[in-house]
Image (cartoon, rainbow, N blue to C red):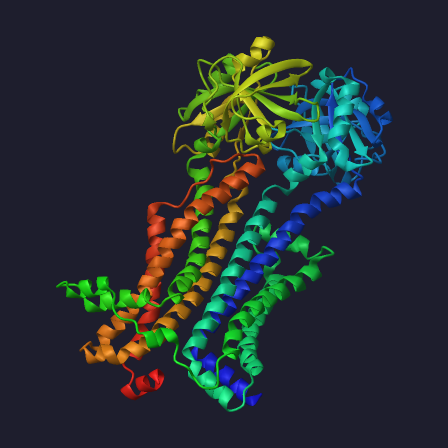
Amino acid sequence: MRAMLRWAHADLRTHRGEALFLISATAGIVASLLLAAALFGYATNPWQRVFTQSHGAHVWIRTAPTADPSRLGALDGVAALSGPYDTVATTVASRGARAAAELRAADAVPPATGRPLLTAGRWLDPAVPDGVVLDSSLAAALVAGPGDTLTLPGGTGRTLTVLGVADTAEPRYSPGERPGILWAGASAVDRTPGRSGQVVGLRLTDPDDTAYAVQRAVTTLGAGAVTDIGTWQQTRAEAQGDTRLLGQVLGLFGLAALLAAALAVFGAISTRVRGHLRDISVLKAIGFTPGQVVRVFLVQHLAFAALGAALATVLTQALGSRIPGRLGDAVGVWQGLPGHTAALLAVPAAVVVFIGAATCLAAWRAGRVPPVPVVPAAATAGRGLTGAARRALAVRGVPPALVLGWHRAFSRGRHTPAAVARLALPLLLMTVALSAWTTIARFDTSPERLGLPAALTARPADGVGDREARALLQRSPDVVDAHRGLEVAALVPGQTGTIALRGLGTRQDPYPYSVVEGRPAHGPDEAVAGQGLLDLLGVGVGDWVRVTVAGHPQVLHIVGRSIEPENGGRTISTSLDTLRENDPALRPTVYHVRLRPGADPHAVRAELAQAAAGRLDIHEVTGPADRLSSLRGVVAGLLAVLALIGLTELSTAIGGTIRDGERDLLALKAIGLSPRQITAVTVTAVGCTALAAAVAGTALGVPLAHWLIDHEGRTSGMGAGIAHGPSALHLLTLTAGAVLGAVLLSAVPAARAARRRLADTLGAVA
């Protein structure tokens, strides 16, 4: 045992940098996987907790006021109803903030199904007829809490008093897209002007039969009576949203980095075994068994892995909740979940076991080394110069060190492609990470190419006509155009759900769609659709689809696929003229405002809101870049972890190149090369290996990144066509950094090897 420890200690002293890199890389990998587990738990838990505690409804159906939703309780598969509730669409304001709201009539006792969970204040009180309870997302948008007052539109001076704030498993408030929920007494709803309707929630006995239950409910009520349908799957997906994407990114890169680290360990041990064949033979000659030799390497690298895993676990547990933004919130919530302790132990243990398996595989070769050292066949065969190398040496002006270094780098037989492949893997992953970074940045710099040409949306108040609204918007010199728009909920074929049907722009003033397949919609009945809608209906570009709006069919020809960042891509868009052909009474309800390049949306919004004096409800358009801002920090951390793995592999490649060059050292000195030139030979060999790996990694990483990002866009409903690879300058910088790092890291050990005494060199060759 003492001899084993002395051998391990001597090996550690020789490869201290490599050990530090392995420990740091393992810590980064374990931290990435733990944060991924936290994000997955956080993405699912908050909504699931509210849904379970509130006995939430699986389906929410909004109908016309003349319908009778109470009949749905008699359908097979419906366990309970929440409602029906009378509703009024209105707008409320508080402290200068305005928001669209659905005022929903409720009783003095919260319902048993779909029950709002109070987080502040109290429930409705008959003694306060104008008291309301706000959904928490709407309360956050209005910065309102118990005791505050909300102002209703119309100039009547009527106000509502906030009694409480509650969480709900229904879709959250989204400015300009989805109204927030206010629960109020029936008398308050009846006295509020606005578009009236009803809403009912269905709790099903079998949630997997949601589509069939929705179809039966629509058939019972009549397609003309249904205005909107929301299912629990859609709501859960929206609640998880980009948090789950962050978890997927961290998990994917964590597993890929784990594979790269395992390969780095495998390469390090294999290279070390080749360089210490004589020492291992001596150990066996003095009595070491093959198992003891294997255990020396295994215990040493398991200790590195365990130390890195323990360090990452302690830091994540102690400091993870202090990380700014969503990551810190996720860790804080995850630490209170039932499976937290199990994941905290299982993830590091799995990483250590995986690295241990790679260590065993590489160390097994050390156990097979015979007690009497045998010169490898490759060495006895000789490694003469190739014809190309001899011709290059004959060219006047070509440095011999450059030619010999290139020859050494690519004349190591099967070890050369193995070293290049191991080093290329972290560089490939770094290229993918950079592609994710540039794709997110593109949403900021070129949103018009990714389905977000408008920076602002404006909704006119009651009584404000089209001409007046456009005149108000055109007052700012920063406004380029204000495209008229209208969005309605439409039933899909089969009546299993609703989609967003949008009329944007006119034939004289077309809307600038981001079409990535087919062409824009110009003619009558032509439309473009998002990937989510194409997947939902099982159609493609060139097909005709039939949707139902308030009982009226609308047949559209899909001529293009556009990038749709919102609504899961379940959107079909046509011109406002096409919608008016079926219903001439339709009027634009929203204006998509495009700004000149360089204009500040926040400043323009403030300017327009002041000029409109309450006649327009103006919001900034939020894109994926706003929601994915925390992903940039994640990508930066992943790049650091991958860089550590790359440094580990570089140190292995340097050691292998120096050991392989020991046999050539005497020959190089014999032909008159100085120690400086011999050093240049080794440095050039390492640099050529790094250059080959960088070229291979970036060449394979760019198409892989495009495929991964477009695949994520396709599965999320946004659609393929959003990927944007790193610029040529970034790829060149990555390649140059890899080569320069290899050269700098190899300079000192190569210089030491070049100045070895002849006796040392003869001993190494013997």
Residue 193 in view of the camera: no
- List the single residue furthest toward the bottom: 286
For the point 66% across and 23% down, the residue is 492
For the point 39% across and 77% down, the residue is 376
For the point 49% across and 56% down, the residue is 638
Q: Nearer the viewer, residue 626 or 729?
A: 729
Quarter of the image where one finds residue 164: top right
Residue 62 in view of the camera: yes
Position of 763 relative to 687 (above/below): below
Query: How far from the left and from the top, in percent, is residue 510?
Result: 45, 18
User: Relative to residue 182, is residue 8 drawn left or right?
Assistant: left
Query: How far from the left and from the top, in percent, is residue 612?
Result: 52, 22
User: Relative to residue 123, is residue 241 drawn left or right?
Assistant: left
Q: Quadrant of the C terminus?
A: bottom left
- List the single residue furthest toward the left: 396
User: Relative to residue 53, is residue 621 drawn left or right?
Assistant: left
Position of 617 relative to 147 (above/below): above
Q: Nearer the viewer, residue 740 or 386?
A: 386
Q: Quadrant of the N terminus?
A: bottom right
